Image (cartoon, grey):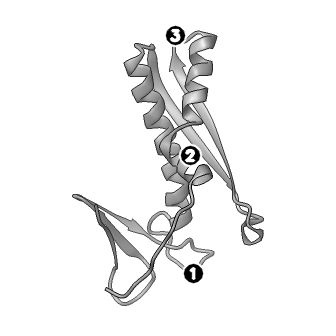
Amino acid sequence: MSISIRRNGTTGVTHTVHIGDVDFPVDASLAGGGDGAGPSPHDLYDAALGACKALTMLLYARRRNMPVEDIQVTVDRDDGEERKGVYRLKASLHVTGNLDEAQRAELLRVAGKCPIHRLMTEVTTEIETVWA
């Protein structure tokens, strides 16, 4: 699968991300020189973690017939030491439904093993940048 990103016009820094049939803007924050017209690349990175945790928990709960009603994941970023090599994310989970403590513990365990969490913490990513 290819994902493409293309600049919107010749002014500003807003770009459009194309993933399959979905398009959405990406931009730098106002403080970072953008217009705030969309999420920043850091926002997308952080959101990928939260989305993966939510989807992983829901799919797991459905397979196990757990009575999950709603899932909300909030990801908070501490990038104060990013330039020193430390980027901290805190994922807070809120799940509603008639779950017992064992089910809640199992969902917490599963959230910690979602594919993006593992990709961010256990895998070496190799990136090659070339001219098209």
Q: Mark 2–mark 3 contact, CB under 8 Å?
A: no
- Tell me the residue that label 1 is attached to: 33
- Tell me the residue that label 2 is attached to: 117
Q: In the rendered view, would you say 49 is above or below 65? A: below
Question: Residue visible at 53% across and 63% down?
Answer: 125
Mark 2, other Cα within 10 Å: few <14 / some 14–19 / many ≥20: some
Q: CA distance from mark 2 to mark 3?
A: 26 Å
Could you tell me which secondary element the residue under label 1 belongs to?
A: loop
Mark 3, other Cα within 10 Å: few <14 / some 14–19 / many ≥20: few
Quarter where residue 92 is shown: top right
The mark that comes first in sequence, 1 or 3, is 1
Question: Residue visible at 36% across and 88% down?
Answer: 131
The quarter of the image holding the C terminus is: bottom left
The quarter of the image holding the N terminus is: bottom left
- Tell me the residue that label 3 is attached to: 98
Q: Nearer the viewer, residue 104 or 127?
A: 127
Residue type highlighted by circle 2: His
Q: In the rendered view, would you say 49 is above or below 25? A: above
Question: Residue visible at 42% across and 76% down?
Answer: 14
Could you tell me which secondary element the residue under label 3 belongs to?
A: loop
- The location of residue 93, given as percent across then percent down, is 60, 33
Disc number lying in front (1 or 3)? 3
Disc number lying in front (1 or 2)? 2
- The location of residue 76, given as percent across then percent down, is 65, 49
Q: Mark 1–mark 3 contact, CB under 8 Å?
A: no
